[in-house]
Image: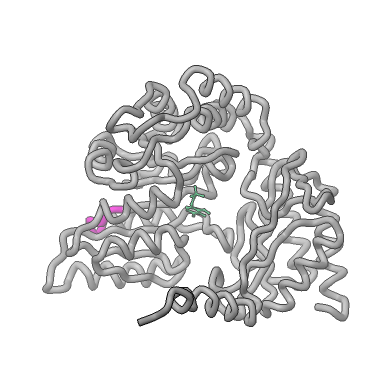
Amino acid sequence: MKTAGEKFDFFEKTLAGREQRRLLRVLRPLAPASPPEVLVNGRVLVNFSSNDYLGLSRHPLLLERAAQFMDRFGAGSTGSRLVCGDYEIFEQVERKIADLKGTEAALIFNSGFQANVSMIPALSDPSAVILSDRLNHNSIVNGARLARCEVNCFRHNDLDHLAGLLHEARNRNSGHSRILIITESVFSVDGDRSDLDRLVSLSREYGAMLMVDDAHATGVLGERGMGLTCGRPVDIAMGTFSKACGGFGAYVACSRMLRDYLINCCSGFIYSTGLPPAVLGTIDAALDLIPSMDAERERLHGNADFLRKSLKEQGWSTASSTTHIVPVIVGEESKTLALSKFLENHGILAPALRPPTVEPGQARIRFSLSSSHTRAQVESLVRLLGQWRFSDDS
Ligand SMILES: Cc1ncc(COP(=O)(O)O)c(C=O)c1O
């Protein structure tokens, strides 16, 4: 029998192993300043790693609406929405989401992670088949695992591979209850996009359900900035309010029937307290602002195009990015850490992404741009990356 101390040995061993491989994750406290700046150890750094793509996290209207909703409804929603937490503001905000997304209905979830991890099992049964892009977010990977059905990954954005898997699933003798295709519209790590039109037509051809995670496009791309699923017949469009919307929480935009189904069958909705009213206030305000933020979106995409072009001229690989998320693939973890440190010493916050978040040998810095970055700030980042690339440390 293990002693009280021994039973925790694996904590220590795991942490020591990670430290040895220089993969130990640690929290670094910081304080927000005026976007895109943050305070780290008392120093002002320009943040190139935040998902606050429109700089809304400090917008006065979000703060004001949060205070108004909290004043009216209190600090918490006091229970699951199915018990006693269904304040009228939930349905008001859901109506706004559905109108903007162009769907019959919408349902709010407490976070994107919670939505994916609980909705995917709810949409499946043991004889379902899930076909998931290999680079889908961890919340989708875990949702698919919890579905306890057959899960096949198709090569990243390789829709011929997906078509082959669909064909195989349809022709197999064993039969299946349903096929669920899951992808992202903008991939969180590489900043590339999926071909939603072809995905829609494949899903129709094979009678499969199509679920698209629009987290990184919501606020930034698509009709009125409301995501790339807008105007497309995607069965299940989910997205988050934690990125361009500047707050927290998530949505599913879908048919009325699917909304009713999720209210009845999705554990992450049923067994969790509804979002706090203040958070709903930030969502409500962000949804009022986003449709008219074309100028901010233009600045954001202009800066992203400039960054990508400049980096390519310096010889960096930016993978297949076509959006406001621009990775710089460095490869070796130690070099990526050194580059991140170099940038920080020069006033830029851009942490390294290392395995297991990315494949071994694919360590990188994921630069995420915000409309609050000035062109001068992006130019200064480009200068520093050029300096490092042609120095002895690179
Ligand atoms: C593609 C994608 N989906 C879902 C999530 C989870 O969203 P949230 O932060 O709201 O839990 C993330 C977060 O990084 C994401 O990148």
Compared across the picture, whether 34 is left or right of 131 comes to right
Q: Is residue 63 magenta?
A: no
Tell me the quarter of the picture where residue 174 sits. Answer: bottom left
Percent from the top left, x then y, of residue 325?
63, 56
Percent from the top left, x then y, of residue 212?
40, 52
Which quadrant would the N terminus be assigned to in this image? bottom left
Compared across the picture, whether 271 is left or right of 351 comes to left
Write down the region rendered in magenta.
Answer: 204-209
User: In the rendered image, is residue 7 in sight?
Assistant: yes
Taking depth in this image into account, of 168 and 363 the one nearest to the observer is: 363
Q: Give the residue displayed 45% in from the left and 48% down from the top.
A: 112
Judging from the image, the colouring scheme is one colour
Tell me the quarter of the picture where residue 264 sits. Answer: top left
Q: Give the residue displayed 73% in from the left and 45% down from the top.
A: 31
Percent from the top left, x then y, of residue 362?
61, 76
Compared across the picture, whether 259 is left or right of 392 comes to left
